């Protein structure tokens, strides 16, 4: 039993620490462009196959008496094993999550920005890329609990103290007790299966479905916009040094319908994003009210249909009222990906 608890503690905490470090780094790398970005991504991918023995030797040297971290006294302790496993699995969570976050459509993050969602940008990216992140976490945890080399070098395989399921399997096999080794292997596989099921339930919003069955609805209070004027004075906009718009002036008064025409690549979309506040441009942009942009192709967010109504002041009942108005109340708990094209447009 001691080996099971040591395995859970070391692998579990190592995974948590790798998540806390890796996800912010992944969001930072996915959101920003910087020198050597591609090289860093390639290096991280190469470290997916980082040999555990190498990590164990490096951590052993760092924690040994003459090492840079020798004064911590973590050699042959659970703390030292956690450090080794965290370093081993960090590239997996960082790199795979980075790839998943980069695949989030720009339109999705623009919808969040337009809706003034008061949630840190990192958590929005984590929520939208949760399937890839879930896979990264499961892969990292699986590698941590199945790892032998690093924990044996750093932990010393001390019975009742630093012995894990994997090191126990190695010891039982060496001593010829194959039945015991197979039983321990089955326990290790069962542990991985339980964690995999829990992560899958979070990915599929199963827990959310049990407590969000409210179908009551109330009509929200409608706010009258008294001044919806929008003005652009000498606005210029460039992307990567290429000038897209130059000295554009435009005035749109409340109640007016304005059509913007132009050839492909003339900057129509860029201008609309400037008006809506997504893109920042040089010049004067005066937005007296909140402007929104509706993409031609329906954009849906993670979660259920109801959660796609992300106006911050709406209650669940008020969201249900809007869904009822467009005939989608019964689909409130559905995944948007299961809707038809017409239902998505609504």
Image (spheres, grey):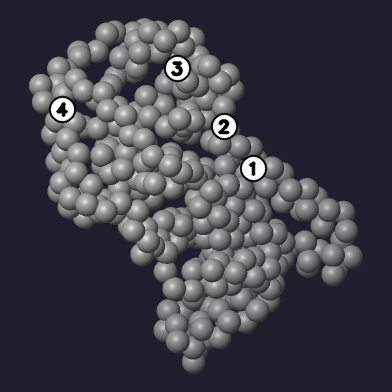
Task: Read off the residue under disc 1.
Answer: 196
Crowd tier of the residue under label 4, counting other residues whose Cα lies within 10 Å: few below 14, some 14–19, many 20 or above: few
Task: Compare marks 1 and 4 and give the one earlier in the sequence.
Answer: 1
CA–CA distance between discs 4 and 3? 27 Å
Q: Is residue 11 visible?
A: no
Closer to the eye: label 1 or 3: 3
Q: Is residue 51 visible?
A: yes
Crowd tier of the residue under label 3, counting other residues whose Cα lies within 10 Å: few below 14, some 14–19, many 20 or above: few
Q: Residue at x 39, y 39 (%)?
A: 262
Closer to the eye: label 4 or 3: 4
Is 200 or 285 nearer to us in this picture? 285
CA–CA distance between discs 2 and 1? 12 Å
Closer to the eye: label 4 or 2: 4
Q: Residue at x 35, y 53 (%)?
A: 244
Is 166 or 222 nearer to us in this picture? 222
Crowd tier of the residue under label 2, counting other residues whose Cα lies within 10 Å: few below 14, some 14–19, many 20 or above: some
Task: Compare marks 4 and 2 and give the one earlier in the sequence.
Answer: 2
Task: Read off the residue under disc 2.
Answer: 204
Q: Secondary structure at mark 2?
A: loop
List the single residue furthest toward the bottom. Answer: 66
Report whether 168 appears left or right of 227. right
Q: Residue at x 49, y 74 (%)?
A: 36
Task: Read off the residue under disc 4.
Answer: 253
Contact check, label 1 and label 4, Cβ < 8 Å? no
Is 144 or 301 nearer to us in this picture? 301
Residue 47 placement (x, y as % from top left): 62, 70
Which quadrant of the rendered structure holds the C terminus? top left
Q: Secondary structure at mark 1?
A: helix
Rendered position, 95 above or below 338: below
Task: Read off the residue under disc 3.
Answer: 346
């Amino acid at each position: 039993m001691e080996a099971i608890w040591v395995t859970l503690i070391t692998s579990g905490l190592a995974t948590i620490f790798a998540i806390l470090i890796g996800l912010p780094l992944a969001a930072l790398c996915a959101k920003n462009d910087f020198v050597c970005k591609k090289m860093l991504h390639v290096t991280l991918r190469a470290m997916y196959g980082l040999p555990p023995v190498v990590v164990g030797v490096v951590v052993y040297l760092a924690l040994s008496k003459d090492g840079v971290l020798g004064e911590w006294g973590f050699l042959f302790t659970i703390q030292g094993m956690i450090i080794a496993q965290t370093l081993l699995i960090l590239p997996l969570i960082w790199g795979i999550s980075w790839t998943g976050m980069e695949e989030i459509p720009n339109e999705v993050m623009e919808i969040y920005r337009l809706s003034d969602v008061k949630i840190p940008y990192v958590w929005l990216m984590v929520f939208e890329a949760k399937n890839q992140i879930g896979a990264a976490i499961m892969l990292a945890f699986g590698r941590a609990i199945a790892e032998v080399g690093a924990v044996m070098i750093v932990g010393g395989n001390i019975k009742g103290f630093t012995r894990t399921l994997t090191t126990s399997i190695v010891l039982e096999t060496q001593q010829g007790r194959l039945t015991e080794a197979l039983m321990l292997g089955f326990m290790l596989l069962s542990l991985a299966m339980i964690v995999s099921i829990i992560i899958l339930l979070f990915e599929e919003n199963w827990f959310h479905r049990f407590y969000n069955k409210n179908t009551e609805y109330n009509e929200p209070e409608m706010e009258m916009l008294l001044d919806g004027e929008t003005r652009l004075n000498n606005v210029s906009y460039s992307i990567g040094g290429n000038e897209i718009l130059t000295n554009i002036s435009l005035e749109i008064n409340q109640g007016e319908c304005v059509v913007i025409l132009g050839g492909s690549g003339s900057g129509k979309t860029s201008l609309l994003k400037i008006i809506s506040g997504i893109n920042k441009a040089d010049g004067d942009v005066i937005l007296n009210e909140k402007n929104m942009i509706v993409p031609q192709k329906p954009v849906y967010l993670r979660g259920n249909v109801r959660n796609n109504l992300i106006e911050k002041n709406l209650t669940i009942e008020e969201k249900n009222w809007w869904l009822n108005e467009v005939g989608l109340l019964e689909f409130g708990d559905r995944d948007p990906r299961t809707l038809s094209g017409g239902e998505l447009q609504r």
